Amino acid sequence: MGADFVMMGRYFARFDQAAGAKLPTRDGFVKEYWGEGSNRARNWQRCGQGGQGLVFEGGVDGYVPYAGELNEGLALTVAKLGTTLVSCGSATLPEFRSTAPLTMVSDQGFQESHANVTLQDTPTAVS
């Protein structure tokens, strides 16, 4: 609630306009995703951070659920944020930060409030 900015690479990677292949799975489609700090990005080559002897990995690579066109997805996200603000009695983000009520939730309540999700293996190509 106090963030001045957020990193949203994973969010934007889901859309058609982002780099990465769209791959079919049993449950729909996913897109490949790799963060700038990941081994796959090899940012030492692109950012001049040393030679081939420099080895590090500080990011992730994997798959994100495919979400279609950016303009539609972003419009939906902005609408959800607006609805959340209104639900908390705020009209702006600064007002939300200063007036939103915080409610303690038990671990059991937290677990019960989430969908039952099963992690999937790497996508399997469909012929």
Image: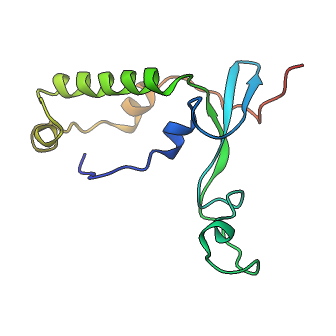
> Camera-side residue: 121 or 67?
67
**Considering only vertical position in the picture, is 119 above or below 2?**
above
Vertical placement of 44 versus 77: above or below? below
Number of marks in the image? 0
Residue 47 at x, y percent in the picture: 60, 69
The quarter of the image holding the N terminus is top left
The answer to whether residue 70 is left or right of residue 124 is left
Q: Quadrant of residue 17?
A: top right
In percent of width and height, residue 97 lies at: 16, 43
Which colour scheme appears in the figure? rainbow
Work out whether residue 101 or residue 51 is closer to the camera in this orientation and state it: 51
**Residue 51: where, in percent of width, then height?**
72, 80
On the image, which quarter does residue 40 sit in?
A: bottom right
Please tell me which residue is depicted at 37% across the width and 23% down the height of the picture. 75
Does residue 112 appear left or right of residue 18 in this picture?
left
Task: Quadrant for the C terminus, please.
Answer: top right
Vertical position of residue 91 compared to residue 126: above or below: below
**Could you tell me which residue is drawn at 37 percent across and 26 percent down?**
77
Using the rendered view, name the quadrant where residue 16 is placed: top right
Tell me: residue 66, above or below residue 94.
above
Position of residue 37 measured from the top left corner of the image (x, y, whole percent): 60, 61
Picture residue at 44% right of the left edge, 24% below the top: 71
- Is residue 78 left or right of 89 when viewed as pictured? right
Q: Nearer the viewer, residue 77 or 20?
A: 20
56 and 17: which one is in front?
Answer: 17
